[in-house]
């Protein structure tokens, strides 16, 4: 505990890091205040957006926006249109040569063009989603009768679009002047704001029951274990050793060969991150919609596909996650690109021929570790269902796994890593000034990080 407070003190003593943390907290506060500003002409008391079921699409969007979606605030769409636009551009980068060229060959100018295209696409997506959202509000009769339809549609469409663009701007400012990835932090805050209430509800549900305290303690132990396993899966990598070619040292007459440095290619166990769960969860609303069209609201199929604790829901959800993990990993991990990069760096994998043989070797390793990674990701995704079945309150059960836990762990680790880098840089500055600079370890954390 003493070491923890010393670390906090060291963080606060670094002026640049202190300013960045304060900027981050200030911009997050602005975002949370905007989540409570209701759209003009909307009557919140008449607004019913469905349940908070994490298996429901509305519940998922509401979770990402920190409750702003169900409150019909100016940030009702939050940062989600920007996330959608980024995913679309990323997928186009795998399939369309123009976007491939922008991403890999045109450097900084290509990245600027991609940023501009992403922003324009965000505006278009916001117009479509905003119109659909306002139509849903209108259909539920949650509009003040004194407001004319033209004023309601035009003004609120502009406000929703402005809110999304402003949220996108806040995320970019946090990334530039704060700590961590701004867009990810805004999603993290949207998820974590519901944690205190869910925690309180869980405590209240256990107080009056027999053995409630023991049950609650066991739940906390289980949650801790799940978080630790998620951290391990998120951080786990398979190191493929590489060696750089020998180089000649000395004058031409007396030069001697020196063995090249050794390094590794880090292939992540979960290279796809949280994306398979997001894709799978978006598709899970289709079976329930189809079931309602065929058999009505009372059909067993529709009910099971709407209940995240049901066996059919979790079987389909698990299979979709495994499939999307393979698909997304195949898209983002390009063995040929690794092979070309090794050739450019005059490096090779010991015992493997350069070129196609190297690409096939990396592809084989990636395919082998993707299976356990996909299964582990699928188990984490369906963990909230098991927690709910064993008596955990629904709102709190969702933090036992799924999208929320993976985002919380991933963003927290990324932010802590940036803070740690500032602490290390501060320490290195002191060593340099004192003339006692020691080795900093390997200059590379795997060539995959530089690609």
Image (tube, grey):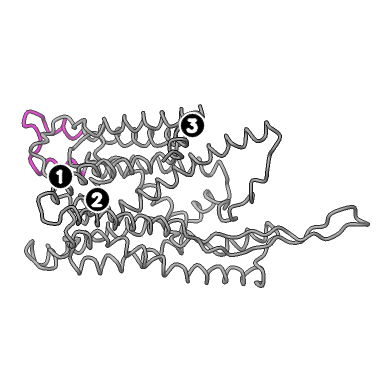
Q: Which residues are magenta?
A: 132-155
Which dot marks residue 192?
none
Nearer to us of marks 2 and 3 is 3
Q: Secondary structure at mark 1?
A: helix
Q: Secondary structure at mark 3?
A: helix
Q: Is residue 343 above or below residue 7?
A: below
Left or right relative to 322: residue 175: right
- The earlier-in-sequence mark between 3 and 1 is 3
Nearer to us of marks 3 and 1 is 3
Residue 356: % across, % down:
61, 70
Q: Residue at x 7, y 38 (%)?
A: 46
Between the C-alphas of marks 1 and 2, the distance is 16 Å
Between the C-alphas of marks 2 and 3, the distance is 33 Å
Q: Which residue is mark 2?
A: 60
Residue 144: % across, % down:
8, 32
Left or right relative to 202: residue 185: right
Q: Quadrant of the N terminus?
A: top left
- Give the class, few, some or many, for how many residues have Cα within 10 Å of label 1's Cα (few <14, many ≥20): some
Which dot marks residue 17?
3
């Amino acid at each position: 505990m003493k070491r923890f407070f010393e670390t906090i003190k060291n963080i606060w003593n670094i002026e640049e890091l202190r300013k960045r943390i304060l900027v981050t907290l200030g911009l997050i506060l602005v975002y949370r205040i905007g989540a409570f500003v209701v759209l003009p002409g909307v009557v919140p008391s008449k607004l019913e957006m469905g349940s908070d079921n994490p298996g429901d699409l509305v519940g998922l969007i509401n979770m990402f926006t920190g409750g702003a979606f169900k409150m019909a605030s100016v940030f009702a769409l939050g940062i989600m249109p920007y996330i959608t636009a980024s995913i679309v551009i990323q997928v186009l980068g795998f399939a369309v040569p123009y976007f491939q060229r922008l991403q890999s060959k045109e450097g900084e100018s290509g990245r600027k063009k991609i940023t501009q295209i992403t922003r324009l696409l965000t505006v278009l997506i916001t117009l479509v989603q905003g119109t659909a959202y306002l139509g849903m509000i209108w259909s539920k009769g949650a509009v003040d009768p004194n407001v004319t339809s033209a004023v309601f549609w035009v003004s609120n469409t502009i406000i929703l679009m402005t809110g999304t663009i402003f949220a996108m701007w806040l995320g970019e400012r946090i990334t530039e002047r704060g700590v961590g990835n701004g867009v990810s932090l805004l999603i993290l805050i949207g998820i974590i704001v519901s944690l205190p209430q869910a925690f309180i509800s869980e405590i209240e549900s256990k107080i009056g029951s027999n053995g409630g305290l023991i049950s609650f303690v066991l739940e906390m132990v289980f949650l801790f274990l799940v978080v630790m396993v998620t951290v391990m899966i998120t951080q786990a990598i398979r190191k493929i050793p590489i060696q750089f070619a020998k180089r000649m040292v000395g004058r031409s007459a007396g030069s001697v060969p020196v063995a090249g440095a050794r390094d590794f290619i880090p292939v992540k166990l979960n290279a796809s991150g949280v994306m398979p769960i997001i894709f799978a969860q978006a598709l899970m609303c289709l079976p329930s919609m189809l079931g309602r069209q065929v058999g009505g609201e009372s059909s067993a199929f529709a009910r099971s596909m709407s209940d995240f604790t049901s066996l059919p829901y979790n079987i389909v959800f698990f299979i979709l996650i495994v499939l999307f993990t393979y698909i997304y990993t195949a898209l983002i991990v390009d063995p040929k690109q690794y092979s070309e990069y090794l050739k450019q760096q005059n490096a090779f994998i010991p015992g493997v021929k350069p070129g196609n043989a190297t690409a096939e070797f990396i592809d084989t390793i990636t395919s082998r570790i993707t299976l356990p990674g996909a299964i582990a990701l699928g188990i984490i995704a369906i963990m909230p269902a098991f927690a709910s079945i064993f008596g955990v309150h629904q709102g709190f059960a969702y933090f036992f796994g799924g999208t929320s836990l993976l985002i919380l762990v991933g963003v927290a680790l990324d932010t802590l890593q940036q803070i740690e880098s500032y602490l290390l840089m501060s320490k290195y500055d002191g060593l340099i000034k004192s003339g006692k600079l020691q080795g900093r370890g390997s200059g590379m954390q795997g060539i995959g990080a530089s690609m």
